[in-house]
Amino acid sequence: GTLGVAVIGAGRMGADHVRRIDEVISGARVAVVADVDGARAEALTDAIEGAVACTDPVAAMDVPGVDAVLVASPGAAHEAALMAAFDRGLPVLCEKPLTPDPDSALRVLAAEQRGGRRLVQLGFMRRYDADYLALKAQLTRGAYGRPLMLHHTHRNVASPPGCTDTQTLHDSAVHEIDVTRWLLDTEITAVRVLRPAPSGGAPEGLHDPQLIVFETADGHLVDTELFVNCGFGYQVSCEAVCERGTARIGDDRGVFVNAAGRWGGTIPPGFVERFAGAYDRQVQRWVNATRRGTVEGPGCWDGYAAAVVCRAGFQAQRTGERVPVDLPERPALYR
Ligand code: ISE
């Protein structure tokens, strides 16, 4: 039957997912929306037949007709929500980051393993973006030989209020961490963070932009320009340099205009617009897999690995040095 979804968190992503499940996704319906701000949850459920609102995430999971949970609350609230879902055997789509640090991620990983089966698909949605999927297919085919390097660019118009250096890694660069591991099918083994004199457009105290360099277990070098206050638009790109060729995605040109002595186009304002297709595909794939009783895509292991790389990254930010990443062996459940 139709999958009844409890959406936890009615912020930017939660609201977008509620709209998506209601209007775009087939085979699922919004059963309940929970948010500490009850009015914010109600504003979303008011227009949806059969959907209720509440303020408590755990109570939301116990609403009759709930078959699965979409966690879109702030990262610090994920652990409690995931544990409650595990206790109930409910499958989860959890927004990134899995949790804010490796210790809590490890607790989640251990709890899922105790249950003996995967329940979590993690919201590393770039794996569902048409461009990234095409790039992944090229690399898998190996048409240009072995990948040697990746050059990532990740630019946001402005960082959220109160953004800190560590947040730039675990909220933003976490995507490059995941995409690097996924595209190259390997683990990140060391991190460096280099920083120019900060942009005048960056909030006081934030080192922006940053140049992040990863090494991998298979000898790749991967650089990321992370610039979260570029001011002009949302841009994410990736170029893979292989032995006999390069492949590049993310230069989404859209409509090309000639007018008034200029040529050009527009740049999307944010990730909700740029990655709309990826979010749609991610949620539809989650719903389809969940209805079949399976779990696919990125999961808790990927969230944990990303958290461990971030922790090394924080140290690299502070010291300016090359920091090795110490990742334990991948548990059997995630092989
Ligand atoms: C945000 O949380 C995301 O996940 C976006 O994909 C990323 O581009 C942005 O920098 C983050 O703040």
Image (cartoon, rainbow, N blue to C red):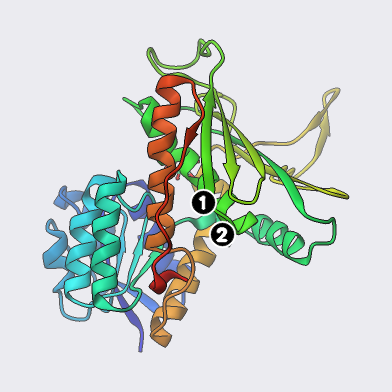
Residue at the location (31% across, 25% down)? 162
- The image position of residue 102, as x and y in percent, is 31, 47
| Camera sees residue 254 | no
Q: In the drawing, what numbered circle is on residue 127?
A: 2
Q: Residues within 10 Å of mark 1 (few under 14, many from 20)?
A: many
Report the front residue among 10 and 306.
Answer: 306
Mark 2 vs mark 1, CA separation in Å: 9 Å
Up the image or down, 73 lies above or below 137; here it is above
Q: In the image, is the residue at mark 2 within 8 Å of ligand 1 by its beta carbon?
A: no
Judged left or right of residue 288, residue 93 is left
Residue at the location (21% across, 50% down)? 77
- The image position of residue 154, as x and y in percent, is 58, 36
Q: In the drawing, what numbered circle is on residue 178?
A: 1
Q: For the N terminus, give its image quadrant.
A: bottom left
Tell us which disc is closer to us: 2 or 1: 1
Dot 2: element: helix
Q: Are marks 2 and 1 in contact (CB under 8 Å)?
A: yes
- The image position of residue 31, as x and y in percent, is 25, 72
Report the front residue among 17 and 131.
Answer: 131
- The image position of residue 185, as x and y in percent, is 60, 59
- Numbered marks: total: 2
Up the image or down, 34 lies above or below 240; here it is below
The residue type indicated by label 1 comes to Asp
Report the front residue among 28 and 133.
Answer: 133
Q: In the drawing, what numbered circle is on residue 239?
A: none
Residue at the location (15% across, 49% down)? 36
